[in-house]
Image (cartoon, rainbow, N blue to C red):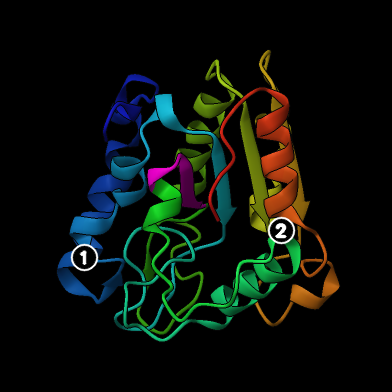
Amino acid sequence: MNGWEQYLDLQKFAPLFARVDEVYRHKEVYPPREDLFAAFALTPPEKTRVIILGQDPYHEPGQAHGLAFSVRPGVKLPPSLVNIFKERESDVGVPMSQNGDLTPWAQQGVLLLNTVLTVERGSANSHKDFGWQAFTDAVVEAAAKLPQPVAFVLWGAQAQKKAAVAAASDYPRLVLQSPHPSPLSSYRGFFGSKPFSKINAFLETYAETPIQW
């Protein structure tokens, strides 16, 4: 996990991982097993500057690839990602794109994480009771202890449950909370929340390079 294992007691989560592996063997689960921890592989702890936290992966074929909200090049943009790009354009002027691969964000230190890391085909939130939240709680708790400035972006009710843990740090932290970018909730305060400019203003306050959104 590219350094994250130093901050996490992975043995504690062995039963969770075993259950997940069993489901992968018998059902169609997303993201593909080899992409399950892709976010950690692309964004090691020492380079993490932003954590964007959502709910669970896309549940239709060919979408989820281990980075929250991201799809590979050539895949039609899911509605939540369309709304993220709309807010990005409104906030920092980046034009809409049909390329939904957020790997460049991850490579700049944006950990793209969901509170639940797996889902069954066609069944949103189907793994919400597997115990993933305890694992992602541990990740957020570990991130709160990192010495560098870190911005936490909590989109949706599930992510917002981690706000107190995210804020509990002796180091510079920004915690942004808004409704999920899903079409069901985006008009309740996601649009106009300006997360991208707020993150960059926070990073620049501490002499960090802003994210190229």
Q: Is residue 128 above or below residue 15?
A: below
Q: Is residue 201 visible?
A: yes
> Measuring 33% from the left and 46% from the top, which residue is drawn there?
16
- Magenta-span inclusion, residue 38: no
Q: Kindly identify which numbered label has been placed on residue 24.
A: 1
Q: Amino acid at mark 2?
A: Ala
Q: Position of residue 61 (x, y in %)?
A: 31, 83
Q: Position of residue 62 (x, y in %)?
A: 29, 80
**Residue 39 horizontal side relative to residue 200, left or right:** left
**Residue 169 horizontal side relative to residue 99, left or right:** right
Q: Name the main secondary structure of what is drawn in magenta.
A: strand
**Residue 127 horizontal side relative to residue 17, left or right:** right
How many numbered callouts?
Answer: 2
Q: Nearer the viewer, residue 41 or 7?
A: 41
Q: Amino acid at mark 1?
A: Tyr
> Measuring 53% from the left and 50% from the top, which residue is drawn there?
212
Which quadrant is home to the N terminus?
top left
Q: Is residue 162 visible?
A: no
Q: Secondary structure at mark 1?
A: helix
> Measuring 45% from the left and 80% from the top, which residue is drawn there?
123
Q: Are marks 2 and 1 in contact (CB under 8 Å)?
A: no
Q: Secondary structure at mark 2?
A: helix
Range of residues picked out in magenta = 107-114
Q: Kindly identify which numbered label has been placed on residue 125.
A: none
**Residue 42 horizontal side relative to residue 158, left or right:** left
Name the residue carrying label 2: 157
Q: Is residue 145 above or below residue 186?
A: above
Q: Is residue 173 above or below residue 81?
A: above
Q: Nearer the viewer, residue 121 or 168?
A: 168
